[in-house]
Amino acid sequence: MSSSCRNIATRGIRDGRTAIQHSNWRQFVHGNNLYDAIVIGGGPAGSTAAAILASKGRSVVLLEKEKFPRYHIGESLLPYTYFPLQRMGLIDRMKTSHFPKKYSVQFVSVDGRASQPFYFFTHLKHEAACTWQVLRSEFDQMLLDNARAKGSEVQDQTMVREMIQDNGVVTGVRAVGKNGKTLEFHAPITIDASGRDAFAVTRKGWKVRDPYLNKIAVWTYYQGALRDPGLDEGATTIAYLPEKGWFWYIPLPEDIVSVGAVAEKTYLYNGTRDPASIFHREVANNTWIQQHLAPGRQTGPYRVTGEYSYRSRYCAADGLVLIGDAFAFLDPVFSSGVFLALRSGELAADAVDAALTGGNVGASQFSDYGAQMCKGIEAMRKLVYTFYDHEFSFRQFVDRYPHLHGDLTDCLMGNLFRDFDPLFEAVAQFAGVPEPLEHGRSLIEGR
């Protein structure tokens, strides 16, 4: 395993024994609020981890700072999101929801010419090939309710303020509840699913920013904008802008479309920092976007976000594991965020359960989890770099390497946890392929 795909190593205590033993952990902790696991954050990653652990019979408390339902961006799912949703028993709920069905993704050139859509069902002969465009307020509420239904204790409007540590081992958290009182929660393992707040990463100084993927986004919503007919009605469209910027165009329920521009800060902020002015200036730069928005009416505020790609240097410490955006956040051009959140929640929950069963929740128990997540994230990161390369064209690549079309489609669908070396060796003939970020590497005690 490469150093870039390992977790923080076990930090042995002075007498050389395992850092923290679950089997005798409770005798060292006094008071109430004792659990097998604490989950910080009730987004997709945290709700998934909590639901799976609770379904295994573990006592779990999930601490969420907000009151659900709440707004969140990141509305387009990948086909492979199906499998963690299936494991949690939520596929029937998704099938009967009002979320638009997504069969494909298509690309639109700067001059407004649309490519042939990448239809997922041409490559994946499974009902997972049909996925969804979701309202995150409703989707995330469904996941949180599922965690509660599986047996997790959910405390919303509860802000975690600090980790409780004993000789460097995380043994719980302090939080402020909805009544303003300080609360303590104790468990042998804390799962940080705090999203882009990056609770542990921020406090421990572990953040590694991607040196190139430093984009910002400006977005809003339209009602009554055009939708393509038939199977393409729910498609995600990625429309290019100058300087390798791009628009997303995502159909949502109730005749709403989510639409936003992503590019370098220096490009988008050239001449103005007013979000509405930036947005409409960029709409004029792509004919397809302009024509599709023309019959619609803009609704809601214009929103801005930055800090688009980062990784934690470590994925775990003794008594602590990071999941979802609290571990890594990647440029959203291929809509990987929700899938990586669900998958990390699933993998981490299994690793935590095994660690609790084995009586050792030291950091080394999460090596395989870290390696798997790094592998999937790096595959998508390479594809994102390829997208932004001025010399790269998906059409030219597939024309030259038709036998790799399936590998490319696998990436776009979220089948990330496999070998993509042949794909990126070929991609390197067209574009620069980045080296892995220095993340998830070992930390030697006393270093």
Image (tube, helix red, strand yellow):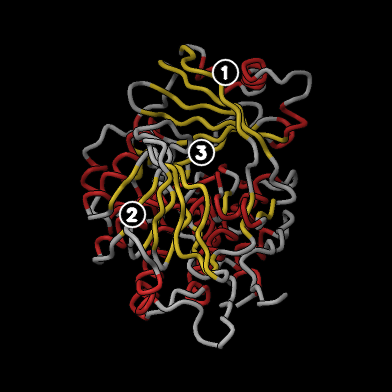
Above or below residue 232? Residue 149 is below
Image location of residue 66, percent across then percent down? 41, 36
The relative height of residue 93 versus residue 314 in the rendered view (above or below) is above
The secondary element bearing badge 1 is classed as helix
Bin the neighbour count of mark 3 within 10 Å (Cα to Cα): few under 14, some 14-19, many 20 and up.
some
The residue at which mark 2 appears reads as 61
Which mark lies nearer to you, 2 or 1? 2
Image quadrant of residue 132? top left
Indicate the secondary structure of the residue bearing disc 3: strand
> Position of 362 compared to 277: left or right?
left
Q: Give how far apart the Cα atoms at labels 2 and 1 are.
A: 47 Å
Mark 3: amino acid: Gln
Total labels: the figure holds: 3
Q: Outermost residue, bottom direction?
A: 16
Residue 154 screen position, x and y as percent = 31, 47
**Quick one: 69 or 181, which is closer to the camera?**
181
User: Label 2 vs label 3: CA separation?
Assistant: 41 Å
Q: Which of marks 2 and 1 is nearer the N terminus?
A: 2
> Disc 2 or 3, which lies upstream in sequence?
2
What secondary structure is found at the residue carrying circle 2?
A: strand
Task: Look at 48% across and 68% down and name the residue there.
Answer: 319
- Residue tagged by mark 1? 290
- The residue singled out by tag 3 in the image is 106
| Closer-to-camera residue (272/168) | 168
Drawn side of residue 139 relative to residue 294, left or right? left
Of the residues shown, which amino acid type is indicated by label 1? Gln
Judge the density around disc 1: few (<14), some (14-19), many (≥20) Cα neighbours within 10 Å: some
Residue sticking out furthest to the front: 30
One can see residue 38 in this view: yes
